[in-house]
Structure formats: C-alpha cells, structure tokens
Amino acid sequence: MINIILFGPPGSGKGTQAENIVQRYEFLHISTGDLLREEIGNQSSLGLEARAFMDKGELVPDEVVIGMIKDKLEKNRNVKGIIYDGFPRTVEQAKALDELLEEMDSSIARVLSLKVTDNILVERLLKRGAISGRSDDRNEEVIRNRIGEYWNKTAPVSRFYEEKCILKEIPGEGSVDDTFLLLSYQLDKLV
Ligand code: AP5
C-alpha cells in the first residue's frame, strides 16, 4: 500500500488534486474535512462537536480526527494506495498516523506539499465561498483564521516529515493542470 500525503494550507488545491490523483492512480482518497462534513450532515454527536470548531476556522481536536482515520484504515486494508488530504494537521496526528501504519507494516512514502501564498489562498476561498455554501468560506475573517491555524499548528508537521527526508515541495500557483503535472512527475516515481 502506497501512502501519500497531500499537504498544504486551506485553498492550496489539495482536494482538487486529490480527485485527479484518484482518477489516474486509483488510490483511496481520505479527506478528514469531507469525513467531518459527512458527520455534520448526519447530525451525529461527533458532527455537532466538530461543527463548533469548523465554523470558526479552528482545528477539530486530535482525538476526534485520529479516531476517524483509524476506523477508515481498518476498513481499507487492501487498497493499492491512499492519498491523505487535510490529514495530518498537527504533529500529534502525524505521530499517530505513523503508529497506525506501522501496525499494518506500512509507512508514508512521500509528502507532497503545495506552496501557495496567503493572498492567493484568500482569493480562491472567497471565490469558492460565493457558491459553495461552506460555512468556513463565508468571510475573510474565518478564512484568515484557518490560514493562521495552518501556520501555527500545521506548518510544523512539514518539518516533521522534512527530517524524515520524505517531503517534496510543489509550486501550487499555476493552473490545476500544471500543478497536476508536477504532482504526477513525483507520483510516477513511486507507483
Ligand atoms: P478541509 O475540508 O480539509 O479544508 P481545508 O484544508 O481548509 O481545505 P480546502 O478544501 O479549503 O482547500 P484545499 O487545499 O483542499 O483546496 P481545494 O482543492 O478545495 O478542512 C475544513 C475544516 O475541517 C478545518 O478548518 C478543520 O476545522 C477541520 N479539519 C479537517 N481536517 C482536520 C484535521 N486533520 N485536524 C483537525 N481539524 C480538521 O481548492 C480551493 C479552491 O481553489 C477551489 O474553489 C478550487 O477550485 C480552487 N483551485 C484549486 N486549485 C486551483 C488552481 N491551481 N488555480 C486556481 N484555483 C484553484
């Protein structure tokens, strides 16, 4: 099983590129944001708890998302590969993922980190917010809060992987197709 993390701030294109990767490489896509929004849609107690954080643009507590990932991995032991989108977002989550994969005799092959400047992120998310109905895209304050959470809590995760020599930075300001070409160049070396 090939494990790839698509890393980057909100709006860097993780979800968009994960869909392209699934199409070409037939990997399983695990997005913790999508899983949480599903819980909210189902009005589960987990969803209600998560919503309070997500609406403010804050991270949901580690134990909630780690529990969801554990469950998802247990149900998908025989897939060809997994693309993680929006997880891990804290060093605690990164360590928990390493432990879960070790139990499955597996590990992270590569972390592909999309680089996009903050102003372009805000521009993209405000544009999406006009049509998506996502409560965390609704105004610039919440969007900037999400980007702040990224710099405070998530950016250190890239150093965690850099030390393991599995991090690769990918310019993410070009077109969707151009960025996918850069990602594919890296992925082709692994599959
Ligand atoms: P999540 O759903 O993961 O959202 P996010 O990281 O904020 O990511 P986005 O979906 O906004 O951006 P993206 O990088 O996927 O870009 P996308 O392709 O969509 O998380 C939401 C919330 O859930 C978090 O704030 C947190 O509360 C909680 N959460 C989730 N995971 C968690 C975790 N592990 N721990 C704790 N809490 C967690 O693109 C964005 C827009 O840009 C789109 O409109 C797209 O069309 C456009 N676009 C993409 N690429 C390009 C391009 N190259 N050029 C022009 N436009 C582009």
Image (cartoon, rainbow, N blue to C red):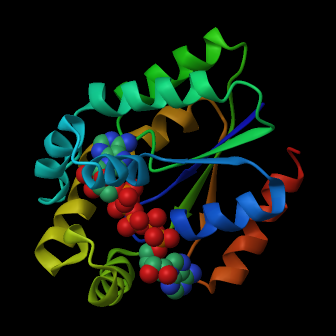
Q: Position of residue 79 (x, y in %)?
A: 76, 34
Quarter of the image for residue 88 reads: top left
Q: Position of residue 49 (x, y in %)?
A: 14, 40
Q: Quadrant of ligand 1?
A: bottom left
Q: Position of residue 96 (x, y in %)?
A: 45, 20
Q: Nearer the viewer, residue 35 or 184?
A: 35
Q: Residue at x 55, y 21 (%)?
A: 98
Q: Residue at x 79, y 56 (%)?
A: 186
Q: Nearer the viewer, residue 137 or 89?
A: 137
Q: Quadrant of the N terminus?
A: top right
Q: Residue at x 48, y 23 (%)?
A: 70
Quarter of the image for residue 125 reads: bottom left
Q: How many marks?
A: 0
- Residue 114 as seen in the image, left or right of residue 152: right
Q: List the single residue furthest toward the top.
A: 103
Residue 91 visible within the image: yes
User: Is 90 drawn above or below residue 114 in the view shown?
Assistant: above
Q: Position of residue 108 (x, y in %)?
A: 66, 31
Quarter of the image for residue 22 reads: bottom right
Q: Quadrant of the C terminus?
A: top right
User: Is 162 drawn above or below residue 83 in the view shown?
Assistant: above
User: Is 124 drawn above or below residue 85 in the view shown?
Assistant: below
- Residue 44 as seen in the image, left or right of residue 28: left
User: Is 153 drawn above or below residue 72 in the view shown?
Assistant: below
